[in-house]
Image (spheres, helix red, strand yellow):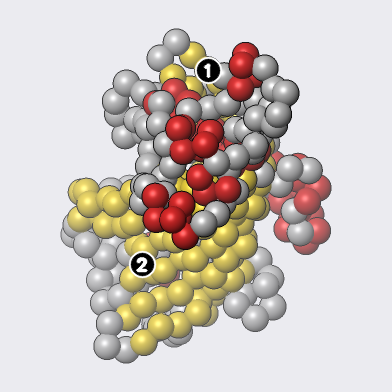
């Protein structure tokens, strides 16, 4: 691509006209855009500025348009961030997400469940207990086990409406998706003084969902290869029993769509999951909507309430 062409690339992503004209190195990348392709075949290429096609492009990256199960693995690290004190590597992490989609009249149901293991920062061993360097306590580790975490994708409004902004660089297609939460906490400080940092829950999740433009535009490909950069900032994890100490958590991972399925997971992670949490190796099969979605915060609250019979204020329940 010439320097002149580079300057003409729209900052928010290429239009269909630019893609078909070859700006950004995309000429011939859509299936059948080579010489001799029929107009009917060319018309099957997605228009990324069209809401429906934009949605389908993202589904190709995150899941499979055919409705088949897709599994992803995401290794990463988890840090503490304490203003004026410093940053500490607390855990290595490894997550698994299993998804499939179903098209309905007004959009696409996105069935999903996910887990994330907290692991020793040196050995990588999945932890059952952890020595908190801030409090000196040994606590039981509550891994992320969220079932379900469904979404509903539509072009008719709502939190997941389309089109989504995208960028193209050569054969790289990137969707940037950010979610910021600031809402009343499920665990008010007065009732959960050991486990809650604030009466308001605040977090951010930052995704960079990337894949090959040539695969996304190919009508023969229903599930494109994908790498997702995932960052998260949140308050202290409730099992750490840090109360309202200053500081926050920083998660940094990259999720890889495993086109060969669960067999491509690291052998130790696969064996541990098959033994302890096998259902997370496939997506949910029953649609329950979004109101039943789970989070580490909601599931930890349930465990605290179970161990305290719902009595408040809740004291330490995870110290070993």
Residue at 65 percent across and 81 percent down: it is: 122
Classify residue 227 as left or right of residue 188.
right
What residue is at 39 percent from the left and 55 percent from the top? 7
Instruction: Point out the frontmost of discs 2 and 1.
Output: 1
Disc number for residue 103: 1
Q: Position of residue 266 (x, y in %)?
A: 76, 59
The residue indicated by pointer 2 is 236
Residue 82, located in which quarter of the rendered image?
bottom left
Residues packed near mark 2 inside 10 Å, few (<14), some (14 to 19) or many (20 plus): many
Residue 254 visible to the viewer: yes
Disc 1 element: strand
Ranked by sequence position, the earlier of labels 2 and 1 is 1
Q: Residue 127, image x and y in percent?
A: 62, 68
| 272 w.r.t. 141: above or below | above
Disc 2 to disc 1, how far (Cα)? Answer: 38 Å
The answer to whether the residues at label 2 and label 1 have Cβ atoms under 8 Å apart is: no
């Amino acid at each position: 691509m010439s320097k002149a062409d580079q300057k003409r690339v729209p900052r928010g992503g290429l239009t269909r006209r630019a893609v078909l004209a070859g700006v950004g190195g995309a000429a011939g990348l859509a299936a059948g855009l080579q010489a001799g392709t029929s107009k009917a075949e060319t018309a099957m290429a997605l228009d990324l500025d069209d809401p429906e096609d934009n949605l389908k492009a993202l589904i190709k990256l995150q899941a499979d348009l055919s409705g088949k199960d897709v599994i992803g693995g995401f290794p990463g690290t988890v840090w503490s961030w304490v203003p004026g004190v410093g940053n500490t590597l607390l855990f290595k992490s490894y997550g698994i997400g299993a998804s499939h989609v179903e098209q309905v009249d007004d959009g696409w149901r996105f069935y999903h469940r996910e887990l994330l293991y907290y692991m020793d920062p040196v050995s990588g061993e999945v932890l059952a207990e952890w020595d908190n360097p801030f409090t000196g306590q040994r606590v039981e580790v509550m891994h992320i086990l969220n079932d379900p975490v469904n979404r509903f994708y539509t072009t008719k409004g709502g939190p997941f409406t389309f089109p989504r902004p995208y960028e193209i660089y050569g054969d790289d297609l990137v969707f940037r998706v950010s979610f910021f939460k600031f809402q009343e906490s499920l665990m008010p400080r007065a009732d959960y003084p050991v486990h809650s940092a604030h009466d308001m829950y605040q977090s951010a999740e930052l995704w960079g969902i990337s894949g090959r433009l040539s695969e996304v535009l190919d009508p023969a490909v229903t599930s494109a290869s994908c790498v997702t950069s995932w960052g998260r900032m949140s308050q202290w994890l409730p099992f750490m029993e840090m109360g309202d100490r200053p500081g926050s958590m920083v998660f940094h991972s990259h999720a890889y769509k495993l086109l060969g399925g669960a067999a491509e997971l690291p052998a130790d992670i696969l064996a541990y999951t098959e033994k302890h949490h096998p259902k997370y190796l496939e997506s949910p099969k029953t649609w329950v909507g979004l109101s039943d979605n789970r989070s580490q915060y909601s599931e930890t609250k349930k465990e605290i309430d179970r161990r305290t019979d719902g009595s408040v204020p809740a004291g330490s329940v995870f110290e070993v």
